Image (cartoon, rainbow, N blue to C red):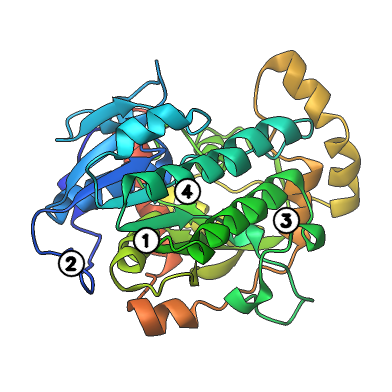
Amino acid sequence: MVQQDVRFDAAFGAPELRPGKNRSRHKDTAVVTGATGHVGNVLVRKLLDCGASVRAMVLPGEDSRPLAGLDVQCVEGDVRNLDTLRSAFAGTSTVYHLAGLISILSGRTEALHAVNVVGTRNVVRACEECGVARMVYVSSAHALVEPPHGTAITEAAGSDPSKIVGPYAQSKARATQEVLLGVERGLDAVVVFPSGVVGPYDFNVSDMGQLILDFLNRRLPAYVEGAYDFVDIRDVVNGIIAAGQKGRKGEGYILSGELLSVSRLMALLQELTGVSAPSLRLPQWIARIAAVFTPFLSSVTGKKPRFTSYSLRVLRSNGLMDCSKARRELDYTARPLKASIADAVEWFRTSDLWPPRV
């Protein structure tokens, strides 16, 4: 398993961690919930690189290998348990709240609500009770109301769950509202809305990571056309830290990259790896019929489906996003996506998940 790798760490390219307005210049102590996730473990690495003292919150019994070799204090906690949050947040200045449940499967509404909504409500309350100086909530671009095709999504779209499709996206929208309610009570908090992420340190293999691995292992016989915005995970992390430093209280910031079609992704992977892209492109209508059966097949095989009705809907959705607010207020930048995919491929190769050479 790959641990810290200076080749990928050096590619962050962001300025040093600086104390924000009215914050002291002593060594910052930050809590990261969801620290073993893809964004979480990369955020921990960047905070350490910036000289911060990091307290990583992990679930009891959770595999903490994504944090192996890192100089962090690991504490057990669960966003569903307020007492564990009080203990984890005590004496810290900044809380980066990333812990959440991601699911494209149906039948997870209650679990999504418990973790994403109630869990975030608990995090907000614990921040208030512990006197945390700043909270940064990592929401999702899915939590923003989607305008018609051709109109870019901006932060002004808002997070109204009644206008958002899908239990996951609705849960992130409601969680965002919980943070904003905390702001109304006086909590100093900001929200970031990342689009789809890709890049190295994908220890638990995200949906995008699984697609890349399936491609590399020649287990992708066909693909479905569509498009969505993707961004380098290291650029997202830089944006998260910048939001903590410079973001305005109560504001939200889209952290996006570039709109990527599935066919363009297949072409990039073929170019970067030498593996031939699948030639069969399934029409959306056939994929939608097949998606009806994927939850059942997943329950039988125990494997995450390659696509579901919701993921197909995302590929048809408006993926045009405007991150100009983050660029203007946070000095946010996003690198070319080809470099991000190349680094993701290389990271998988060095983590022994690359397909056998033939």
Which type of secondary structure does the marked residue at label 2 adopt? loop
Q: Amino acid at mark 1?
A: Ile
The label shown at residue 19 is 2
Marker disc for residue 240: 1
Q: Secondary structure at mark 1?
A: helix
Q: Residue at x 30, y 43 (%)?
A: 31
At label 4, counting other C-alpha atoms closer than 10 Å, the crowd grade (few under 14, some 14-19, many 20 or more) is many
Instruction: Work out which quarter of the rendered image holds the N terminus and state it.
Output: top left
| Position of 222 relative to 147 (above/below) | above
Q: Position of residue 172 (x, y in %)?
A: 62, 51
- Badge 3 element: helix
Question: Gap between marks 3 and 1, in whole Å?
Answer: 24 Å
Q: Mark 2 or mark 1: which comes first in sequence?
A: 2
The three-letter amino acid code for the residue at tag 2 is Pro
Q: Earlier in the sequence, mark 3 or mark 2?
A: 2
Q: Secondary structure at mark 4?
A: helix
Q: Are marks 4 and 3 in contact (CB under 8 Å)?
A: no
Q: Quadrant of residue 13?
A: bottom left
Kindly identify the amino acid type of the residue bearing the numbered disc 3: Val
Q: Are marks 4 and 2 in contact (CB under 8 Å)?
A: no
Q: Which residue is mark 4?
A: 124
* Pointer 3 residue: 314
Tag 2 near tag 1, CB within 8 Å: no
Of discs 3 and 1, which sits in the foreground? Answer: 1
Q: Residue at x 64, y 59 (%)?
A: 143
Residue mark closest to the camera, 2 vs 1: 2
Q: Is residue 76 left or right of residue 152?
A: left
Please name whichever residue, 200 or 272, is drawn nearer the observer in this view of the structure: 200
Residue at mark 4 to residue at mark 3: CA–CA distance? 29 Å
**Alpha carbons under labels 2 and 1: distance apart:** 14 Å
